[in-house]
Image (cartoon, rainbow, N blue to C red):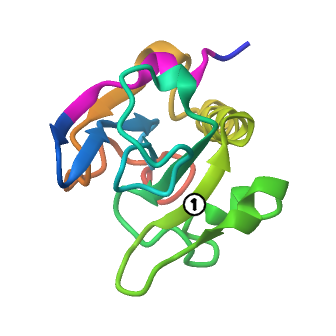
């Protein structure tokens, strides 16, 4: 069974006006997940709480390291778009990521587990211990080529 995603959250910054940001989670060499909740995010409550277990809803971002997440046959959104929780997501104009607002804690856990499962099935990682904690919106490059794609050609 996967960890509770809230156990992985590391605060990156906190500001009275701009809210609090948690670092992102790189799960494998393609997927980045962001769980945010504060007075400036689409969370419930829309407050900056010290105890992350008090949030009922979250703002969740999903992005891909090197391409927009929803490009057919390249983006990983195709793996997730048929889940019930995916209805809350869209890609804001000029962004490369999918963003879900007011995602329940239960749905956020399902998202974390779906991305973890995808990364493990795709042989991007072998366990949760390989998840990398990143600064929000870090510019990334692929860590290694996917041997199933064109990596071995």
* In the rendered image, the vertical position of residue 53 relative to residue 150, given as above or below: above
What residue is at 37 percent from the left and 77 percent from the top?
Answer: 95
What residue is at 19 percent from the left and 56 percent from the top?
Answer: 139
Which residue in the structure is indicated by mark 1?
101
Q: x, y percentage for residue 138?
A: 21, 51
Q: x, y percentage for residue 144?
A: 33, 42
Q: Is residue 137 left or right of residue 63?
A: left
Q: Residues within 10 Å of mark 1 (few under 14, many from 20)?
A: some
Element marked by disc 1:
strand
- The quarter of the rendered structure image containing the C terminus is bottom left
What residue is at 57 percent from the left and 49 percent from the top?
Answer: 148
Looking at the image, which is closer to me, 124 or 94? 94
Direction bottom: furthest residue: 93
Quadrant of residue 108 in the image? top right
Q: x, y percentage for residue 128?
A: 52, 18
Quadrant of residue 119 in the image? top right
5 magenta-colored: yes
67 magenta-colored: no
Looking at the image, which is closer to me, 146 or 39? 39
- The quarter of the rendered structure image containing the N terminus is top right
Q: Is residue 60 left or right of residue 111?
A: left
Q: x, y percentage for residue 62?
A: 50, 55
Boundaries of the magenta span: 3-12
Looking at the image, which is closer to me, 87 or 129? 87
């Amino acid at each position: 069974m996967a960890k509770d995603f809230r156990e992985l959250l590391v605060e990156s910054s906190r500001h009275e006006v701009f809210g609090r940001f948690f670092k992102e989670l790189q799960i494998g060499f393609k997927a980045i997940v962001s769980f945010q909740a504060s007075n400036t995010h689409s969370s419930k409550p829309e407050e900056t709480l010290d105890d992350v277990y008090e949030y009922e809803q979250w703002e969740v971002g999903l992005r891909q390291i090197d391409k927009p997440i929803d490009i057919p046959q390249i983006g990983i959104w195709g793996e997730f778009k048929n889940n019930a929780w995916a209805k809350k997501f869209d890609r804001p104009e000029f962004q490369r990521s999918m963003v879900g607002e007011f995602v329940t804690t239960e749905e956020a856990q399902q998202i974390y587990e779906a991305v973890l499962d995808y990364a493990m099935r795709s042989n991007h990682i072998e366990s949760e211990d390989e998840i990398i904690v990143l600064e929000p919106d870090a510019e990334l490059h692929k860590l290694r080529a996917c041997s199933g794609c064109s990596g071995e050609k």
